[in-house]
Image (cartoon, rainbow, N blue to C red):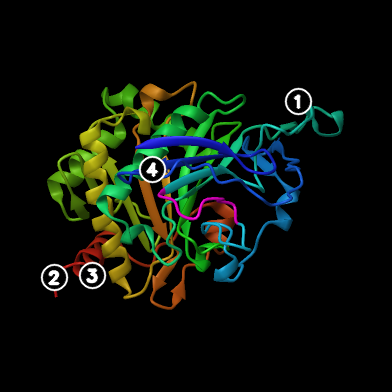
Amino acid sequence: MRKTVRHLADGREIIYFDDSAKPPPRDALDTRDLPAVAADSQIRRDPLTGEWVALAAHRQTRTYKPPADLCPLCPSKPGKPSEIPESDYDVVVFENRFPSFAQSVTGEKGTLDGRGLVPVAPGKGRCEVVCFTSDHDRSFGELSQERVRTVVDVWADRTATLSTVDGVEQVFPFENRGEEIGVTLHHPHGQIYGYPFVTPRTERMLATAAEYHAAHGRHVLGDVLAAERETGSRVIAAGEHWTAFVPPAARWPVQVLVVPHRQVPDLTGLTGAERTDFAEVYLKVLRCCDALYDRPLPYVAAWHQAPVRRGRDLSWLHLELFSVLRSKDKLKYLAGSESGMAVWVNDATPEQIAERLRAACAPR
């Protein structure tokens, strides 16, 4: 894989990752007249929960559902410049033009209104967009196994780089797919957030892992993985180095964990063989998901990685995929119990979810 770093008209970094045999030099210029990125992010900690909340009002003006011929993630064409100046690409990463967190934000740490009750700080971090292919009409599940392996290498590269960025405490690669999830750009792409704090979900998982290790001397996800591989009732796909299964306390109508058999804190710790095996197992999972309702499944695919500076010995890298679609044309809404009290009520058991997924991708 060849990596080439360039810059867009407003100074943002763009990085080309080429897996083709003889890629071009990647020297196309961004001809647009762009204003400087004006990110004004702030984070505030909720005094009742201790959780950080990001405020990024400048994102209200971000691009929203453009027509396909004006897609900003497609390669540039004559008279139609996009975020990617080249006429074609393999995988490309660039700084988000409307970031939730950025290095350019200003401000000082303090408290809201100087009262000492609500800590505030500039939302200093980094947000990147990852385009998986130049083909506007493909999906991640339609990529070749070789391309998925390239994307894994890109995720690992960006995790390593963003972990050194000033203010970043956790690196989060993810993909949102489908309008039901809230996607406004249909080109196959994901994002990477470099958070200026450790996320609430990760804090909770680290606390649970620490408690379990103190009681049993083992990692909780390692024991869950072993139990799932032994029983097999919730397993969707498995390879030499990874197993995909519906979690035993699934919250979502479709939910799958893809877990490596070896504990590593983040994507940078995966071997070449583990990265290749992930590509094979994950593509199987995505094929099952798209076959479930005989339509493209809207989903979130989220990498759970260790924080940059702490809890790394308690972290076990894994991917979580979930969907809000509970039938072909019905959504799972987060209503009173879920939104108000964070108590989830699922309309299907994990065993039923797993059986439906296995049946969907079985030979017909």
SS type, badge 4: strand
* Drawn side of residue 347 relative to residue 308, left or right: left
* Drawn side of residue 262 relative to residue 313, left or right: left
Can the viewer see residue 206?
yes
Looking at the image, residue 293 lies above or below residue 64:
below
Real-space Cα separation, disc 4 to disc 3, in angstroms: 34 Å
Real-space Cα separation, disc 4 to disc 1, in angstroms: 41 Å
| Mark 2 crowd level (few <14, some 14–19, many ≥20, 10 Å Cα) | few
* Residue pointed to by mark 2: 363
- The residue mark sitting in front, 4 or 2, is 4
Q: Which residues are magenta?
A: 82-90
* Residue pointed to by mark 4: 18
Quadrant location of the C terminus? bottom left
* Residue pointed to by mark 3: 360
The kind of residue on which mark 4 rests is Asp
Residue at horizontal 71%, vertical 37%?
A: 44
Looking at the image, residue 57 lies above or below residue 180:
above
Real-space Cα separation, disc 3 to disc 1, in angstroms: 51 Å
Camera-nearest residue between 206 and 179: 179
Real-space Cα separation, disc 3 to disc 2, in angstroms: 9 Å
Residue 12, by quadrant, is top right
The x, y position of residue 351, in whole percent, is 24, 60
SS type, badge 3: helix
